[in-house]
Image (cartoon, coloured by chain):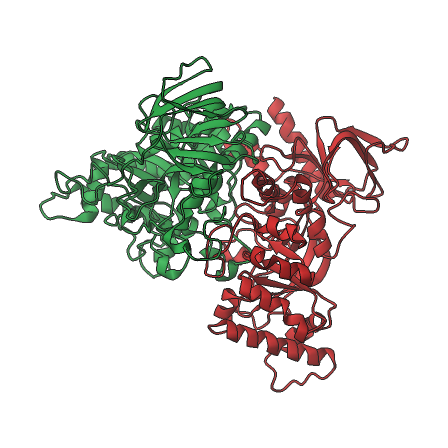
């Protein structure tokens, strides 16, 4: 979250849900927690794709999300799925609606791996502050989905301005174990179940460093140091390993799910040295870290991250706002890419999520100036397929491949340009945003009857 | 080997800049795309001449005086330096590290008397990074703490020398609306009472009728507010809600000499005609479009465009030093240009957008014609860019302040160079510098 001088009355440390307070969490869908109830998962997804026409997007430059660029491309989708992607010569079956994309660009739906929408919705009032269960350093028992307010107007802005079609909501970073994450489709719904991404794996949000030790040290209890962080972490893992499942223990069910490989670890961790310690802890306990989030120092250990097959979810250029961000550099993503490690651009911010494309472009440009040229189509992968991979949904979305969800954005210019905006956004083949159709944009319950209702915003 | 040479060069430049203050050079940049910052469209194939630290001329067909160092600007853009108003640049090294952070003083016994110019760190990394991003001037101010008055702002430059402050006590800042209500005791009504009382006591001070007894302001605060009441110093008012904006615009009826500038103004578009009629300029955060608070329900990306269309003078501002900082001002301005292609939205032209981060903030800050514009007599603050400055892929390649070429290196560039490869060779990375 950008620190706004105008409104920074609350003090610098109030500046961000996640960078200072936050934490993680959620998910749960078809396959729910381990040792939890066998059979049907609780709070199951009730998301159903909305109807859409069979559509042929023609004439645009296509970035398929998997690194491929097709000039004058054709993208076919029908019944919610991508049917085919090819060049101008790709035959368009009968019954398809043609959408002329000449001069425009097509990407898969943009995916934000790190959001607090719904858990820290706007208006950002205390009554809405549901992202950190900051009552104990280890709260793996909480699920972010139980805090999500589906009426958060931030979802609509992310769709209309950022082309966001899927996003992971995490608990904040006050806790070492923040709880479970939830992955959502960015489709307005009356209930969070109605937004839950079908079949997305659960995630566990963990946090390194300054935040847990500040929050709990400030309360005069452990952890108050980084060594305290690790002591609490390790004891919590050992206790979980000894869990026999006879009596339901929600915290240990989550941890067991990680140890069984069913729940993905998303670990807020800025510093390279701490990431290395976490990787050793994961080895010690027998789990895998899927992604480090806010990994501003990843560039120092690109080799280690490549070898460990861990993604780094990063901002383009945030730095210097807290001690553990002091070595942030804009070339982080490019240096990671050069090292062969997985790069994801994330927002952690209700404004930044509207411009993930621009953030990716800044990371690309910083690399170019440092002599690391990265093709546009590769950079788009950082906000599509790589994010999907780290969220465990890459078999369903993240690239324009036959059989995948028809999550598609038509941009009015190259999305890596500041001058680009989404013109149309389809989710599962349903046209849910159209810049040319004022009624084809969602308005949350909260905004009805308020100043600017239905405005372009 | 090449890497070593690059590093050595960069280091030498950095030390050189610190050791011996550079002097202004006479320079001409020719055949570039030039944007003068005054709201006009960029001109291709233009020339900018600076001499004695000042701009001599900018435009097509400008003659280059004989003997002037000439830089070929082919493929480059040249603009005035960016002017970022109302930031905390130079007031914190790390916002989250309290000891390094001078942006607020919630427990101070003073408020309006606080003077941001007394704390500016010219060697701050945030200043270095902003400079490398093309920001050459800024107005800075502390945030309100224990009182609705935040204190007196300063105008600074980002030059790599020991003199950052251009003008101290350039304006006073007060907050109204929700934040002020919180500070003043719980409501806007209380905040207004604080304001009215402070202006009354300051008026008495200005008139030489200050009584020590029975006043709520400290003497220092009353003294600091006296020039606000007399109109000698502008009063920047942070306000968001349309109703609150109208209330602020009515203040001059009671305090006729107030020189107002509005800050924030998320709902300015709703009362844009009132603001225009009052002739009060605005400094807005252009990308707020969420109902972050109940006083920002109408926030929209079109706010700035709609106000400009109504005739309001609008600068972009409010970006602090930490997290991203003033250097992303061009990205913000670029987004307003992009908006002009969105049906139903109101954006800015390229020229208007660039003016909103150069000449207009300079004018609002009292430096019209001197900063933020490439016109004869203006300071030789210019930036040579490798492309369209509002585009996220572009960056400055050279920055001049008062005609002096500036170093563009920082803690960040040194880290980048150290970790360009991960080879530890025969010694640890700590020996690579």
B330 versus B114 height, above or below: above
Residue B365, position as x, y percentages in the image: 71, 56
Q: Is residue A434 left or right of residue A229?
A: right
- The tint chain A carries is green
Horizontal arrangement in the rendering, residue A143 relative to residue A400 (left or right): left
Q: Determine which quarter of the picture holds residue A164.
A: top left
Pick the front one: B165 or B207:
B207
- In depth, the one of A116 and B98 nearer the eye is A116
Farthest front residue? Answer: A95
Q: What is the tally of numbered marks visible in this picture?
A: 0
Residue B422 visible to the viewer:
no
Out of B141 and B128, give the one closest to the viewer. B141
Which percent across, then down, holds residue B191?
54, 73
> Quick one: which chain is red?
B
Q: In this rendering, would A110 be left or right of A197?
A: right
Asked if residue A97 shows in the view, the reply is: yes
Q: Position of residue B381 (x, y in %)?
A: 75, 43
Q: Position of residue A127 (x, y in %)?
A: 36, 61
Residue, far right? B66
Query: In the image as oriented, which residue stretches furthest toward the left?
Result: A246
Picture residue at 74% right of the left edge, 26% below the top: B74
């Amino acid at each position: 979250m950008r620190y706004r001088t105008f409104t920074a009355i609350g003090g610098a440390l109030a500046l961000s849900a996640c960078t200072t307070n936050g934490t993680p969490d959620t998910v749960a869908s078809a396959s729910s927690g381990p040792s939890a109830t066998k059979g049907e998962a609780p709070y199951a997804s009730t998301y159903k794709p909305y109807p859409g026409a069979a559509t042929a997007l023609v004439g645009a430059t296509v970035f398929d999300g998997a690194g491929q660029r097709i000039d004058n491309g054709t993208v076919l989708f029908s019944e919610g799925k991508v049917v085919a992607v090819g060049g101008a010569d790709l035959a368009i079956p009968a019954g398809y609606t043609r959408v002329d994309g000449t001069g425009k660009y097509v990407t898969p739906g943009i995916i934000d791996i790190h959001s607090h929408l719904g858990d820290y919705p706007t208006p950002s009032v205390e009554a809405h502050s549901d992202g950190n269960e900051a009552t104990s350093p280890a709260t793996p028992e909480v699920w972010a989905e139980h805090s999500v307010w589906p009426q958060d107007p931030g979802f609509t802005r992310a769709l209309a301005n950022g082309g966001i079609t899927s996003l992971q909501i995490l608990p904040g970073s006050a806790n070492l174990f923040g709880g479970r994450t939830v992955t959502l489709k960015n489709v307005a719904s009356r209930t969070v179940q109605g937004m839950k991404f079908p079949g997305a794996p659960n995630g566990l949000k963990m946090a390194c460093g300054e935040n847990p030790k500040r929050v709990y040290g400030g309360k005069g209890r452990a952890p108050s140091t980084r060594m305290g962080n690790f002591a609490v972490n390790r004891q919590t893992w050992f206790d979980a390993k000894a869990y026999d499942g006879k009596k339901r223990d929600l915290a240990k069910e989550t941890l067991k799910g990680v140890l069984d490989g069913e729940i993905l670890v998303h670990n807020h961790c800025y510093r390279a040295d701490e990431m290395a310690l976490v990787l050793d802890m994961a080895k010690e306990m027998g789990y895998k870290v899927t992604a480090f989030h806010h990994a501003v120092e990843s560039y120092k250990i690109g080799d280690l991250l490549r070898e460990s097959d861990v993604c780094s979810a990063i901002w383009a250029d945030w730095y210097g706002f807290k001690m553990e961000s002091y070595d942030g550099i804009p070339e982080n993503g490019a240096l990671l890419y050069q090292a062969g490690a997985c790069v994801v651009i994330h927002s952690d911010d209700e404004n930044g999520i509207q411009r993930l494309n621009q953030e990716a472009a800044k990371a690309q440009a910083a690399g170019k100036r440092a002599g690391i040229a990265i093709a546009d189509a590769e950079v788009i992968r950082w906000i599509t397929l790589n994010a999907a991979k780290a969220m465990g949904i890459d078999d369903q979305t993240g690239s324009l491949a036959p059989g995948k969800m028809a999550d598609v954005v038509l941009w009015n210019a190259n999305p890596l340009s500041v001058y680009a905006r989404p013109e149309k956004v389809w989710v599962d083949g349903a046209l849910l945003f159209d810049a040319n159709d004022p009624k084809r944009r969602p308005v949350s319950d909260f905004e009805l009857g308020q100043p600017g209702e239905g405005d372009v915003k | 080997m090449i890497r070593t040479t690059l590093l050595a060069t960069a280091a030498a430049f950095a030390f050189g800049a610190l050791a011996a203050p550079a002097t202004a050079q006479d320079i001409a940049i020719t055949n570039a795309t030039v944007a003068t910052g005054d709201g006009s469209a960029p001109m291709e194939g233009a020339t900018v001449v600076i001499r004695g630290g000042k701009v001599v001329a900018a435009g097509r067909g400008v003659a280059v005086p004989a003997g002037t160092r000439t830089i070929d600007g082919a493929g480059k853009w040249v603009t005035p330096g960016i002017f970022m108003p109302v930031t905390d640049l130079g007031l914190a090294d790390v916002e989250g590290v309290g000891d390094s952070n001078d942006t607020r003083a919630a427990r101070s016994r003073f408020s309006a008397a606080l003077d941001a110019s007394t704390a500016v760190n010219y060697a701050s990394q945030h200043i270095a990074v902003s400079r490398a991003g093309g920001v050459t001037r800024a107005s800075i101010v502390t945030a309100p703490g224990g009182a609705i008055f935040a204190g007196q702002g300063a105008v600074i430059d980002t030059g790599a020398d020991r003199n950052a402050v251009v003008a101290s006590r350039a304006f006073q800042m007060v907050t109204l609306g929700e934040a002020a209500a919180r500070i003043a005791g719980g409501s806007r009504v209380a905040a207004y009472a604080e304001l009215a009382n402070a202006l009354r006591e300051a008026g008495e001070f200005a008139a030489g009728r200050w009584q020590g007894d029975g006043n709520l302001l400290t003497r220092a605060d009353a003294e600091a507010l006296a020039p606000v009441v007399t109109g000698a110093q502008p009063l920047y008012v942070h306000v968001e809600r349309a109703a609150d904006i109208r209330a602020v615009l009515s203040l001059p009826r009671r305090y006729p000499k107030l020189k107002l500038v509005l800050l924030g103004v998320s709902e300015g578009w709703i009362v844009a005609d009132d603001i225009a009629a009052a002739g009060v300029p605005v400094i807005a955060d252009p990308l707020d479009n969420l109902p972050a608070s109940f006083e920002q329900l109408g926030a929209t990306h079109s706010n700035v465009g709609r106000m400009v269309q109504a005739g309001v003078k609008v600068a972009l501002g409010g970006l602090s030093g930490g997290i991203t900082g003033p250097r992303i001002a061009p990205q913000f301005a670029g987004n307003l240009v992009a908006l002009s292609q969105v049906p139903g939205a109101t954006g800015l032209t390229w020229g208007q957008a660039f003016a909103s981060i150069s000449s207009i903030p300079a004018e609002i800050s009292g430096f019209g014609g001197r900063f933020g514009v490439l016109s004869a007599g203006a300071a030789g603050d210019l930036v040579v860019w490798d492309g369209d400055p509002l585009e996220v892929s572009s960056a400055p390649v050279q920055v001049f302040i008062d005609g002096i070429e500036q170093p563009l290196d920082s803690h960040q560039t040194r880290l980048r160079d150290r970790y360009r490869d991960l080879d530890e060779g025969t010694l640890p990375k700590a020996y690579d510098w």
